[in-house]
Image (cartoon, helix red, strand yellow):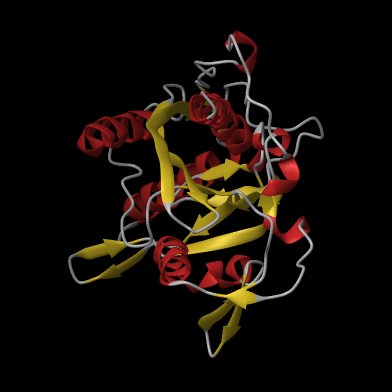
Amino acid sequence: MNNLNRFIFRFSLLVTIFFTVSCNLHFFYKEPVRNLSDMSSKPRIDKSKIALVGFYDFYTEYKRYGKIESYPYTVSYYTRFLDHFDKIGTPADDIKSEGNTNITQNGKDFVQEYLKFTGPTGMREMENIFVFENEIPVALKLRNIEYFIVGSFAPQVSINKRNHYMGGIGQLLTTLVNFVSLGLIPMWQDYYTENRIQVYDKNFNLVFDKSITKNTHFLATWWLTPNDLDTKKGSEGRNDRSKMISKHARKIIYGADLQDLAVDFMEWQASQVK
C-alpha cells in the first residue's frame, strides 16, 4: 500500500468514526390518533382487579446463522412504559398474592405464549403470577383479578423487520450520500415498532387483542438539532444494529401507541357492560 492509499484509508476511517460518534438524531414523531377525553362514556374500572403484565422495554443482539438473521430479544426490567395504562390497571408485581390455587391448561398456555414472545428472560415476569417448579408452572399466585393486560413491544424473538422499510434501499442510498457529502446531507433511517396489548380474563381466555405496527422515521447527521434527548440531555439507549435509540425517544414513540391502545381497550370495556 503506497502513501496515498494509506492516507485515503486513514482519512476515510477517521471520517467514519467522527460521523458515528457525533451523529445527532432528529425523529419525526407521530402524535396519538385518539384521546380518552374524546370518549362519550367511560366504563368504571377497578385498577386493583386489572393486572398489567409486561410493558417492559427490551434490547436485541444481531446474530447470523448462515443465511438466517435473528435478533434475540432480552427483556429490560429497568425500563417500563406504562403510559395511560397506569390509570387502568396495576402492575402484576404490585398486587399482593393471597395464596395459591390450581393452574388450568389455559394458564399454562398463557405462560407458553408469553415466553414464546420474550424468550427465557420473560420468566421473571411470569414468576409474579405463577409458582414454578423446574421452570414448569404448577400453581397460580394472584387472585381476585378480572383481567390480565399483557403489553408487548417489538416483534417476536425470531423475527425482526426493523431496518427493512422499502427493502432497505432508501437507507443504504442515504447512508452512502451522507458519507460522500461528509455528513452535510443527512442519512434517513427508520425504526420499526409493533406495540401490542392482549387482554385475558381471569380464566386466561384471550378476550381482546390489538396491535399497532408502524415505522418511525428519522434523519441522522452531525449538524441537526437532536430531539431524542431528555431534559438532562441524556441519550442513554440501546444499540439497534448501527444506531442508538434513546429511552427518551422510545418513550415518545411508544407513548403515542399506548394512548391509542388504551382508548381501544376502554371502548371495548364499555361495550362489555351494555
Q: Is residue 186 above or below residue 69?
A: above
Locate residue 262, reporting x and y percent.
57, 30
Locate residue 24, reporting x and y percent.
58, 31
Q: Is residue 233 left or right of residue 5?
A: right
Viewer-proximal residue, 75 or 17?
75
> In which quarter of the view is residue 255 placed?
top right
Viewer-proximal residue, 41 or 15?
41
Locate residue 188, reporting x and y percent.
39, 28
Viewer-proximal residue, 153 or 265?
265
Viewer-proximal residue, 118 or 11?
118
> In which quarter of the view is residue 106 placed?
bottom left
Report the residue at 22% width, 32% height from top. Answer: 166
Report the residue at 59% width, 15% height from top. Answer: 35
Q: Is residue 173 above or below residue 18?
A: above
Report the residue at 74% width, 40% height from top. Answer: 234
Any part of residue 192 in sight: no
Q: Is residue 61 left or right of residue 67?
A: right
Any part of residue 184 in sight: yes
Q: Is residue 207 above or below residue 92?
A: above
Looking at the image, the residue that sits furthest to the right is 232
Q: Quadrant of the N terminus?
A: bottom left
> In which quarter of the view is residue 119 placed?
bottom left
